[in-house]
Image (tube, rainbow, N blue to C red):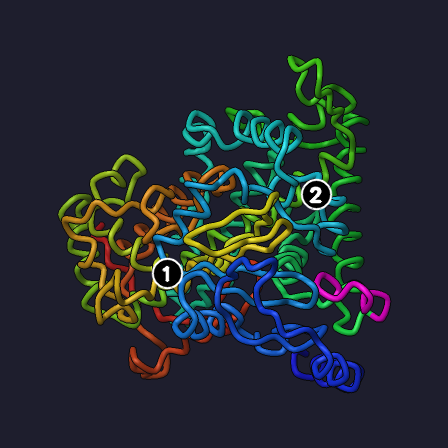
Amino acid sequence: MYYSTLAILLVLLVPLCSFIYFFRPRNHHKNGRKHPPGPAPLPIIGNLHMLGNLPHQTLHHLGKKYGPIMSIKLGYVPTIVVSSPEAAEQFLKVHDLVFASRPNLQSTEYLTYSGKGLAFAHYGSYWRTARKLSTLHFLSASKIECFAPVRKEEVVSLVESVRKAVTAGETVDLSRKLGKVIEVMMCKLLFGQSMDDKFQFKPLVDETMLLAGVFNLSDYLPFLAPLDLQGYRRRLKRTSNGLHAIFDKMVDEHQQGTYAKEQKPYTDFFHVLVSLLDTPMNPNDEEQQYIIGRENIKAIMVDMVAASFDTTATAIEWTLAELLRHPSVMVALQQELERIVGRHRMVEESDLPKLAYLDMVIKESLRLHPVAPLLIPRESTEDITIDGYFIPKKSRILVNVWSIGRDHKVWSNNAEEFFPERFKDSNIDLRGHDFQLIPFGSGRRGCPGMQLGLTTMRLIIAQLVHCFDWELPDGMLPNELDMTEKFGLSLPRANHLLANPTYRLVG
């Protein structure tokens, strides 16, 4: 898709580009101000032709040449690529307010009614209100604790499912099983029920994460939008219509009193939002009275479903893949679990704070395989100068956390290796305070669902490693496991992860 679209684009634009190139002004600095270094852009298309199928890797290699604050041109959009901890701190902490907003994207227009959700909303009072509402009713520490019985129930179900595969001598598709258990778990937390027989969320969520992360020509060359050269607008319409139809039906069922919920010790988030329909989102603020309408509910739920279904499963899958590639690390983790938990029972959530090596394994996995390799794009709200470089208003900001995780200045010469012990006796955290490791972002726009995601991730990994020994199928050697990435807003594996389990608990 990428190369065929690029070929069409070049055929259309090369003659015009050539003319403009030879007659363009040669002054590199705007009003004498120094811009960050970067590769020379072509007229009109800028550096779009350079991105390839895995843009985070391309930008990583370009950053090595041009520096940790690099300037590129994506069509008409000036773009700054940040790829070092020091630079990330400048953009996400020191000058966080200037870079706290989001750009207008075609995906946002279709999926979340031009940013009425949470992740892609422009910075301002609406975003603050939506984030507060979501945190209070879904992502707070007390809510996450209330969800513990649901997590336990679904993880036990996952273990039993794998045990059946052991008995049958079957190879387990871990990608499929992880996707399913996360989907069921999050449906219960978000909607109060499993959606197995009612709605098929997973294909829509996968398409949402892809379309929200791709480099859509319509976002960078608006005059090409009517042509829809990549077919993304058609796919966005189809995906958004599918998601919005599901949520419309669920809202109708709520209002008609026919919505069936499982009995849970908490009120699900969707029920909370529907109960607030047509009421002020922030009743205590007389100046900013946002009314919760259907579009607000659907936009917020698109964000919640997409983030909660996809990111956690992807992070778990990469971690298990690295453990399969490094049997000695798997054994070390199992030894810690035996020491803390023993071989006679499953892991409980109360065990998780004691599992120091598990935390090191997860940090190392998220260092090498951040779920959102370029985070969610930000946009500057004013002209600013950082480290002597002029950053104009309306610049797109891409923080390449994939590249930061491979910075040899930070992680030494073995930065490309999976080596959890590098975090032993280290104070580096992954919650956004230490910019060497920011898989969840940082600052105002850091991921609000981080704690829920980490709790779920820790429990599932610990349980699968504790309850089972794992081997690659068909005699595959660890170094033969395919680790190819598939780019989108998140960064899933290109191919499913398959493994053969053996049950290892006693009794």
Q: Residue at x 17, y 59 (%)?
A: 332
Q: Which residues are magenta?
A: 218-227
Residue 178 shows up from this direction: no
Q: How many marks?
A: 2
Amino acid type, residue under disc 2 in the picture: Gly
Is 36 in front, or is 142?
Answer: 36
User: Is 287 above or below relative to 455?
Assistant: above
Of the numbered discs 2 and 1, the one sitting upstream in the chain is 2
Is 298 in front, or is 40?
Answer: 40
Query: Where does the N terminus fall, quadrant-wise?
Result: bottom right
Q: Residue at x 59, y 55 (%)?
A: 396
Instruction: Give the residue pinned by disc 1.
Output: 404
User: Is 170 above or below relative to 283?
Assistant: below
User: Is 494 above or below relative to 431?
Assistant: below
Give the number of the disc on residue 355. Answer: none
Disc 1 on helix, strand or loop? Answer: helix
Disc 2 on helix, strand or loop? Answer: loop
Q: Position of residue 139 (x, y in %)?
A: 50, 32
Left or right: 309, with 271 as reference point: left
Residue 222: in magenta span: yes
Is 281 in front, or is 310?
Answer: 281
Which secondary structure type mostly characterizes the magenta part of the structure?
helix
Left or right: 357, with 142 as reference point: left
Locate residue 45: give its quadrant.
Answer: bottom right
Amino acid type, residue under disc 1 in the picture: Ile
